[in-house]
Amino acid sequence: MQTDKLDNYLRTYRKKLGLTQREVAFLLGRHGSAKVSRYERSGRIPDLKTIFAYEAIFQIPARELFAGICDRAERETRRRVRQLVSRLRKRQESPVLARKIAGLRALVDGGDEELRYAPITDR
Amino acid sequence: MMDARDQELRVLAIDPHPRGFGYAVFEGPACLVDWGTKDVRRDKERVALERIGELVRRYLPTVIVVEDCANRKSRRNARVRQLTQRILAAARESAVEGCAVPRAAVYRTFAGTGAGTKYGIATALVRAFPELMVRLPPKRKPWQTEDSRMSIFDAVALGLTYFRSLRRKRPRSQDSLSQNTVRRA
């Protein structure tokens, strides 16, 4: 039984540091704690600047702070990559297309697999 | 040693007390996601169930753990006993597994730490989860009523006892957890 990760762990890390929502709001440069509360309840996704500020406050990478959102984005992207690969396969074969498909398949099959390019040789 | 299957479980442990309830959310026995108390002053049962519903919607737990108040040795008052039963019933309705953990099992879990009292268990928990330090109330004097913050520690202890009971049961029947059932640890 696989439990999906929560959208974010902002509340967990804030409580671990013993900070109040108001104090976090101050650190983020906000006036009130309302937005902090909304971010924690997943009522709103913070902008990029705020995400980096959270990273700096908690010293935790964004992909861990927003684990659920990150997992979902990865899943959806992989699904779209598969769709794109199946669309590209219908096109006329060419070396450029083959390399593109290999690159995309590497994304889906193994996240850690490195893209390998054939060495460029002088003709 | 922590089992990968434990990490997949999100557990919501609830400890009702006369003025509300304490809760703890785990993702595996080593990861405390959230903890706190909710104060309920009027229409206690209805409001407490509403607040628990909010927690369930927010955290989508796999299991809800409460104290086994049906146990002969339980000294909880009638309202808390009834609330506990209703929490388990609500869990069944929302297809979440409910688990009732007897108080004795909690003491057995912490016997190794030398904690023989609620306060002893709370201090043992602070050693394991230092973030709980700020919520640890001063030791209760015999003439004082219990601090509501103690229910956080009771909830955390219930959650950890649940994980321990899982590990004990696993060798005999691999993953005997079933959805929508109420178990006694």
Image (tube, rainbow, N blue to C red):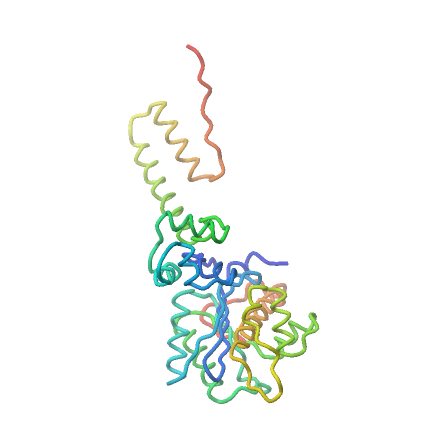
Q: What residue do we see at 41% from left, 10% from top?
A: A123
Nearer the observer, B112 or A99: B112
Is residue A111 shown left or right of residue B140?
left
Report which quarter residue B103 is drawn in.
bottom right
Q: Position of residue A108 (x, y in %)?
A: 42, 40
**Rendered image quadrant of residue B38:** bottom left
Q: Residue at x 53, y 58 (%)?
A: B7
Q: Nearer the viewer, residue A17 or B69?
A: A17
Q: Position of residue A111 (x, y in %)?
A: 46, 40
Q: Could you tell me which residue is drawn at 45 percent across and 31 percent down? A: A115
Is A48 above or below relative to B66? above
Q: Is residue A110 above or below residue B17?
A: above
* A79 on left or right of B156: left
Label total for image: 0
Picture coordinates of residue B63, whole percent (x, y): 48, 68
Instruction: Tell me the quarter of the image containing the C terminus of chain B.
Output: bottom right
Spot the residue most to the top: A123
State the image quarter where residue B147 is shown.
Answer: bottom right
At 34% from the left edge and 36% from the top edge, which residue is drawn? A85
Say which quadrant the N terminus of chain B sits in.
Answer: bottom right
Residue B133: image x %, image y %? 58, 68
